[in-house]
Structures are given as structure tokens and as C-alpha cells.
Amino acid sequence: MTERTGRCLCGAVSFKIVAEPLATRVCWCRDCQHLAANGSVNVLVPTDGLTISGALAEYTKTADSGNVVTRQFCPNCGTQLFAKSTARPQLRVVRTGNLDEPSSIQPSMNIWAASAPSWACLDPALERVEQQPLAPKPSPNAGQA
Ligand SMILES: [Zn+2]
Ligand SMILES: [Zn+2]
């Protein structure tokens, strides 16, 4: 299993992922555009496969999907790091820009593509989902929750 590490812009928050991501997606929902000024690339990992050190600030909002999503960020530098949804308490979203090696993951689909701006660059080789995708299939070692 590949271990991945990452940190926020200022380094006050660092994290380690010890589980294989269940999915990696480029999200074009309007909330992600507010956070990233573009689509945001996110990995979904089992909550128990993510170790975080450092204090996080949180902001909770109902997402376009209708799920209540809590986004977690560094209170010092403001970097968006993680998100969790009431619909999937066993999973955590990790923003891939904070990985020490962002190339260690590969997005497989664009989601909420219908909300993407007209100038957005969406890789046509990736699966395109107009809005909320189906939940990822649990890997053989995950999903016991
Ligand atoms: Zn920071
Ligand atoms: Zn989004």
C-alpha cells in the first residue's frame, strides 16, 4: 500500500493517508469553484485511513447535492484541506493540491460538470458526470462501517 503525505501552505497542518483512495475526481460544483477558483481535485479515502496533525477550522454548509458538508481548513493560512459529508461519514475528501506528490494520484472523472464554467478545461478522456456521482464501490478492505 502506498503511503501519502501532505501539508497546508504554511505547514501548521500535516496529514498522512495510509489507505488507497476509493476515488479521485475533479469536482466542478459551485462550492468547489468558490474554494479553488476552478474545479477542485479530490481523493476519497476511508476516514480511518487518514491521520491529521494540527488544528483545523471548519465551515459547514448544505452542498448542491443536498448533503451537509463540513469543510476543514488551516486556521492560520486558510488552505482548504479536507471535507466530510453527512451522507458518507466513513469517507473523507482530501484536496490533492496539498499532497507532497500530487502526481501520485490520477483523477478518473469530472463531476458536477454541468456547473463548470464555459472556459473550463475538462479532460475528454475522463468519465463525465453532470451532477452528483454514485458512491464509489467499496474496496475489498474498506466499507465495513
Ligand atoms: Zn496552514
Ligand atoms: Zn465540489
Image (spheres, rainbow, N blue to C red):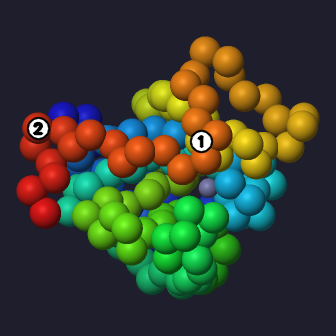
Q: Which amino acid does label 2 sit on?
A: Pro
Tell me the quarter of the picture where residue 33 sits: bottom right
Q: Is residue 64 above or below residue 107?
A: below
- Residue at which label 2 appears: 140
Tell me the quarter of the picture where residue 127 sits: top right
Kind of element beneath mark 2: loop
Tell me if the residue at label 1 has its CB under 8 Å from ligand 2: yes
Tell me if the residue at label 2 has its CB under 8 Å from ligand 2: no
The location of residue 125, given as percent across then percent down, is: 61, 15
- Residue at which label 1 appears: 111
The location of residue 39, given as percent across then percent down, is: 70, 46
Q: Is residue 20 left or right of residue 40?
A: left
- Taking the spot 59% from the left edge, 42% from the top edge, the residue there is 111
Q: In this view, does 44 lie above or below 130?
A: below
Q: Which amino acid does label 1 sit on?
A: Ile
Real-space CA distance between mark 1 and mark 2, rounded to the nearest whole angstrom? 24 Å
- Taking the spot 11% from the left edge, 38% from the top edge, the residue there is 140
